[in-house]
Image: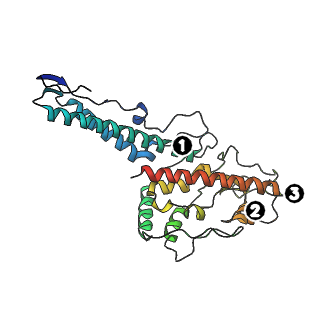
């Protein structure tokens, strides 16, 4: 940046770069070669709007006269340069926020392993989430985790219950034969890996003619809504976190009903190797969801 001189001079002040990172103008969040399409750009609408708003302010800054006579216009010269510096600092922030949102949505979508698409919240559901969230006191804190083997619950009468009910409705929806975590819907007659081979349990036939299997929340929904920071998420982020494809897997109807909202640690009669693997998977996904919640809280404003 030029420095002022005691001699009269006409010096150009500092412009800021008009072009932001190319990815900010993309409508899609990415273009990976994957099983599912990239999440829609509307999932990061607030961050994209912040980038585009800054782009307009940068363009306006650069369009103003930016040659000043020094020392007579030293004040205007310094103000113009200060604004340029501030815009450049803000550019770093808004680009980073958008990149964080994109990464979070891509992680929730698990598109490399899952054919189930991550969807934005419908407007009517958003309104219900807003109303339910308004009923949670500002000083509300999640309860302590249940003892090992006991269910995560959201009791009736809890301030969280209306929000839980809205988010639980039709979740998961009917998803046909979607690929979940790299695995297609089990086939009829395939061994049920949740139980020891000696039981002879296999996947039966559902009323729709498909294998009797259900999409299961790896981390129970009752646990997710009690995770630190969840109730401070925006309605849009609450919806996608609780319907994240990365948190779904196929389970037999028998195993799914046995699990309900408890940890697999509390299930009886299951294969011990399967239980060990499931406990590790649950902890892995829980940590991933908590990390995403924490990141979304920092960027949602």
- SS at circle 2: helix
Give above or below for 139 relative to 16. below
Q: In which quadrant of the rendered view does residue 146 lie?
A: bottom right
Q: Residue at x 49, y 70 (%)?
A: 162
Q: Position of residue 1 (x, y in %)?
A: 27, 27
Give above or below for 167 relative to 240. below
For disc 1, the neighbor class at 10 Å (few under 14, some 14 to 19, many from 20) is: many
Residue matched to label 3: 200
**Precedes in sequence: disc 2 or disc 3:** 3
**Precedes in sequence: disc 1 or disc 2:** 1
Residue matched to label 1: 106
Q: Position of residue 13 (x, y in %)?
A: 21, 28
Q: CA distance from mark 1 to mark 2?
A: 31 Å
- SS at circle 3: loop
Given this view, does label 3 or label 1 mark the residue nearer the observer?
Answer: 1
Q: CA distance from mark 2 to mark 3?
A: 13 Å
For disc 3, the neighbor class at 10 Å (few under 14, some 14 to 19, many from 20) is: few
Residue matched to label 2: 254
Given this view, does label 1 or label 2 mark the residue nearer the observer?
Answer: 1
Q: Are marks 1 and 2 in contact (CB under 8 Å)?
A: no
Tell me if I can see residue 169 in this picture: no
Q: Are marks 2 and 3 in contact (CB under 8 Å)?
A: no
Q: Name the mark on residue 157.
A: none
């Amino acid at each position: 940046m030029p420095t002022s001189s005691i001699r009269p001079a006409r010096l150009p002040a500092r412009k800021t770069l008009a072009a932001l990172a190319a990815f900010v103008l993309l409508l899609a969040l990415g273009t990976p070669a994957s099983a599912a399409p990239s999440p829609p750009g509307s999932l990061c609408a607030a961050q994209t709007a912040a980038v585009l708003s800054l782009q307009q302010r940068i363009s306006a800054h650069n369009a103003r006269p930016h040659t000043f006579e020094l020392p007579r216009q030293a004040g205007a010269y310094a103000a113009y340069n200060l604004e340029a510096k501030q815009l450049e600092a803000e550019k770093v922030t808004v680009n980073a926020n958008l990149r964080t949102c994109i990464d979070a949505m891509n992680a929730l979508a698990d598109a490399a392993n899952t054919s189930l698409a991550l969807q934005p919240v419908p407007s009517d559901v958003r309104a219900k989430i807003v109303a339910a969230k308004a009923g949670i006191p500002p000083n509300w804190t999640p309860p302590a985790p249940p003892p090992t083997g006991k269910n995560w619950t959201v009791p009736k009468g809890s301030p969280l219950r209306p929000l839980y009910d809205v988010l639980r409705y039709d979740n998961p929806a009917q998803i046909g034969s979607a690929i979940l975590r790299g695995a297609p819907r089990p086939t009829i007659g395939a061994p049920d890996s949740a139980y020891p081979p000696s039981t002879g349990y296999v996947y039966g036939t559902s009323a729709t003619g498909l294998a009797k299997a259900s999409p299961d929340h790896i981390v129970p929904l009752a646990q997710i809504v009690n995770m630190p920071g969840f109730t401070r998420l925006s309605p849009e982020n609450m919806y996608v976190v609780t319907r994240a494809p990365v948190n779904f897997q196929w389970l037999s109807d028998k195993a799914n009903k046995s699990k309900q909202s408890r940890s697999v640690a509390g299930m009886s009669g299951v294969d011990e190797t399967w239980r060990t693997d499931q406990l590790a998977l649950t902890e892995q996904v829980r940590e991933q969801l908590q990390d995403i919640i924490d990141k979304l809280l920092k960027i949602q404003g």
